[in-house]
Image (tube, coloured by chain):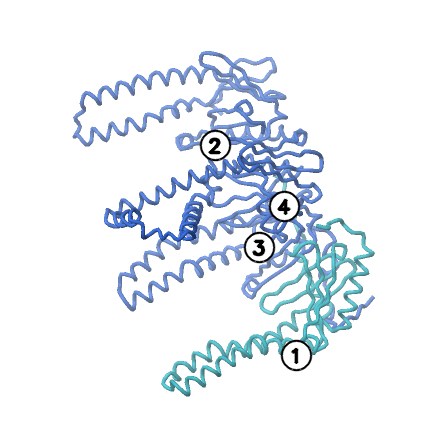
Amino acid sequence: MARHGQTATGLRLRPPRHGVAPRARRWWTAQAWLTVTGPLLLTAAALLVLSLLFFPGALPWLGPLLLGVLVLPAVVYVLAMPRLRCRIHAWEVGESAVYAAGGWLLHKRRIAPLSRVQTVDTVRGPLQRAFGLATVTVTTASTAGDVRITGVSDEDAERIASRIAEAARLTPREGDAA
Amino acid sequence: MSDLRTGGLGEAGQPWRTLDPRTLAVHCTWMGAPLGSLALAALATGGRIGTRAWITLAVIGAVFAAVTTAGVITWRRTRYRVTADAIELRTGLFTRSVRAIPLHRVRNVDITANLAQRLLGLAVLRAGTGGGGPGGVLSLDSLARPEAVRLRAELLARAGAARAEDPVLAVADLRRLRYAPLTFWVVGGVFAAAGAVWRVLDGIGIEPWRIGIVRRAFEDFGNSALWLTIPLGLLAVAALGTVGAVALYAENWWNYRLEWTDAATLRVRRGMFTTRSVSIERARLRGVALREPLLLRAGGGASVRAVAGGLGNREENRRRSVVLPPASRGEAQSVCDGVLGEPFAPAGLTAHPRAALRRRVVRAFAWCVLPPAAVLAVLGALLTPVLLYCAAGWLVLAAPVAYGLARDAYRGLGHGFRGRFLFVRSGTFGRETVALDRSAVLAWTFTDTPFSRRAGLVTATAAVAAGEDGYRIRDMPAADAAGFADAATPGLLTEFLDHGEQPPHIPGFVRSS
């Protein structure tokens, strides 16, 4: 049996050149407070007040339970997530492909050639708008090939979008309008 | 090969060969059942053999003599040979016949063996032309196993040259029905049918447990000997499921035909009551997926799906992209070859590092083996020691099974590329070997978790605009992933590869060029 194609080992993917806007960390922190940390802490506080008022006897075991299950995860999340995301999230529009890295515990790096780009969407949510940030989504014909660049400044988002659109127009298409 | 006797030389210069003489022994296996029952009867009666037993023994002896004589004559008269352009078989006890199949028409070569043949080291080789009917298959029953393997390799090597000429890749074959019981429907079908009946009854306001017959049946079931009725019930469910699975298979795959209608269209036609026809454009065809679910794999079967775009949403794509129903591994292989237009060769894929095995074992134990054991143990400690024994028993039973499955999952992992195609293999319950057109890969994704980072592994996903959209190479070495992707799809990610110097992390859009 002939062997399958082998790889040149040791070649590693470098991180994308451009990091997110410095404001993104505050945006992620706000997001964490609104979606995870805030609700968890509120629940913990409500349960604590209720038990103080009506079941004072439950405090010895309820206190540590709330601390372990609700408060600690909430605090760890709001402290760790924005920090890690700032370190991991990055993007780059190269000569022939767009490259984005993201995630905080689960890291994800995706590369799609500009010749396969179908659309470029820029989305600004209400919270993002407050921080002057945007998310650029580059779609290809495959749902497993959509590249999302989050936490870039408005100006960068516009430049990314126009550059990708221009490159996609110039590059000869490789025929997959599926 | 001592068991190969050469007969006279034919006109083509190739010697005629005989089948393996041990075939005669296989023909005697039918005696097992009557002799066994006779022995049991003798044992039960304490060694006294009555007149009826003597008559049975005499009949067995006579049939044995007749069958063996016929077998010897058949064996002596059956000869085969492979000439420059055909495989020929001379047979016949009373009438002599010579059958020949041109090598270029041979589309699949199967090797099978039943238990007796396996014990004797024999195998049956079937060479098929892909056309229907008994005339399309030439069967050599049976050969020594190494000879069968050698002959298959020889036939396939010679058959490959003209393979692309025949536009018909596969047609319906009743013998494939034997793979129907190896599908999910054997068990799932019965429950699905029961659920459907229940819902219909529920819909018209009948509550089945109120009907006297049903309740009485259940009560009788509960009162009778459970050690007998439960296995019998399971057997009944399995039998019902098998009948259902075969019926479903027959309905779905009656009149099945897979062919290239022209150079650019692959068409699947099938169905008994509802006839279905799916056409797949060559331009949208990105590869094939050879699927071997656990049961089917154990039975030596496989099914094939086309990896194609434009067949509708994910669900419709799964339903419509099947190009070969559960069939023998050899047929699946030849259909893959025919659909791809070049050999589907998943042999020799790069294996994944041992860390991948460790992850699978840990996962199997952490999710499937230990939680029930822990629950049983805690309950046992609180309530009754019987549950502690249950926990221990569960561990003893489940641990080897979980380890075996994890090991099988690890062994299944593989990736590589050859010719136009990228090959990815993974899975244990649903093993799938996928060949993807390398030029159709339109993005690469690399994902890792804190656990996989520590193990030095990464999962690479090739995105295509077809089939499941993303095909994952699970747990490949992190050091090789980028290099492999770059080699498989040249140029796609070359500019982002690390060439030594570490570029600075620049915030914002500042292009150096």
Up the image or down, A58 lies above or below B440; here it is: below
Label 4: how many Cα within 10 Å (few below 14, some 14–19, many 20+) = many
Which residue is the extreme one toward the front? B204
Label 3: how many Cα within 10 Å (few below 14, some 14–19, many 20+) = many
User: Label 3 lies in what chain?
Assistant: B
Residue holding disc 2: B112
Measured Cα–Cα span from mark 4 to mark 3: 19 Å
Residue holding disc 3: B474
Amino acid type shown at disc 4: Val
Q: Are marks 2 and 3 in contact (CB under 8 Å)?
A: no
Q: Are marks 4 and 1 in contact (CB under 8 Å)?
A: no
Measuring from the top left, give residue B107's x and y in whole percent: 59, 30
Q: Are marks 1 and 3 in contact (CB under 8 Å)?
A: no
Residue holding disc 1: A26
Residue holding disc 4: B307
Q: Are marks 2 and 1 on the same chain?
A: no
Measured Cα–Cα span from mark 2 to mark 4: 29 Å
Up the image or down, A7 lies above or below A74; here it is: above
Measured Cα–Cα span from mark 2 to mark 1: 66 Å
Label 1: how many Cα within 10 Å (few below 14, some 14–19, many 20+) = few
Amino acid type shown at disc 2: Thr
Give the residue drawn at x 30%, y 65%: B380
Q: Are marks 2 and 1 in contact (CB under 8 Å)?
A: no
Is residue A20 found left or right of B157 in the rendered image?
Answer: right
Measuring from the top left, give residue B231's x and y in whole percent: 31, 45
Chain letter for blue? B
Amino acid type shown at disc 3: Arg
Q: Of marks 2 and 4, which one's residue comes earlier in the chain? A: 2
Q: Which is closer to the viewer, label 1 or label 3?
A: 1
Q: Of marks 4 and 3, which one's residue comes earlier in the chain? A: 4
